[in-house]
Image: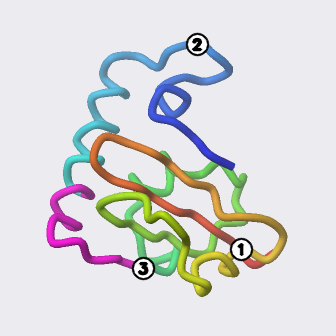
């Protein structure tokens, strides 16, 4: 599922409080800085901070992997395509960073 920044900043169409939007933007800035040299960073879901888990949790608790890259590739590497067992990973298209969240269950 593709999740845009606008969707991330609202719950069922209702915008998040400005404080929560600012918190998410600070997190996105940190992720963007981490991928500035075009690295692909892969984390076990349990190894990411609680702050990240609270923002990127659209799978409702079935998350297992968290992947960050500087831009969306024209095609996904095969290993990334199959990280999610049932469907494509959740894709967050944000300000200067792309996040994939996938699970095996």
> Which residue has dot 3 on it?
42
Left or right: 66 in relation to 78: left
Which contiguous range is marked in magenta? Answer: 31-42
Q: Residue at x 39, y 52 (%)?
A: 51
Q: Residue at x 40, y 16 (%)?
A: 17
Measured Cα–Cα span from mark 3 to mark 2 = 31 Å
Q: Does dot 3 land on a helix, a strand or a loop? A: strand
Mark earlier in primary sequence (2, 1)? 2
Measured Cα–Cα span from mark 2 to mark 1 = 29 Å
> Which residue has dot 2 on it?
14
Viewer-side residue, 103 vs 86: 86
Whether residue 103 is situated above or below residue 29 in the rendered picture: below
How far across and how far down the image is residue 93, in percent?
45, 45
The answer to whether mark 1 and mark 3 are in CB contact below 8 A is: no
Image quarter for residue 68?
Answer: bottom left
Mark earlier in primary sequence (1, 3)? 3
Q: Residue at x 21, y 47 (%)?
A: 29
* Disc on res. 84: 1
Q: Is residue 41 magenta?
A: yes
Q: Is residue 36 magenta?
A: yes
Q: Residue at x 43, y 59 (%)?
A: 72
Disc 3 packing (10 Å; few <14; some 14–19; many ≥20): some
Whether residue 51 is situated above or below residue 8 in the rendered picture: below
Whether residue 55 is situated above or below residue 37 in the rendered picture: above
Left or right: 85 in relation to 95: right
Indicate how the structure is coloured in the image: rainbow
How far across and how far down the image is residue 65, in percent?
56, 75
How far across and how far down the image is residue 56, in percent?
52, 51
The answer to whether mark 2 and mark 1 are in CB contact below 8 A is: no
Measured Cα–Cα span from mark 1 to mark 3 = 14 Å
Mark earlier in primary sequence (3, 2)? 2
């Amino acid at each position: 599922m593709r999740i845009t920044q606008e969707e991330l900043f609202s719950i069922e169409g209702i915008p998040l409080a400005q404080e929560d939007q600012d918190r998410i933007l600070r997190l996105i800035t940190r992720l963007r800085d981490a991928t500035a040299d075009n690295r692909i960073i892969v984390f076990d879901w349990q190894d990411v901070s609680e702050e990240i888990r609270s923002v990127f949790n659209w799978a409702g608790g079935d998350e297992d992997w968290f992947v960050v890259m500087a831009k969306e590739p024209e095609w996904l590497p095969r290993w990334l395509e199959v990280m999610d067992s049932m469907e494509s990973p959740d894709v967050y298209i944000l300000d200067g960073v792309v996040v994939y969240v996938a699970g095996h269950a």
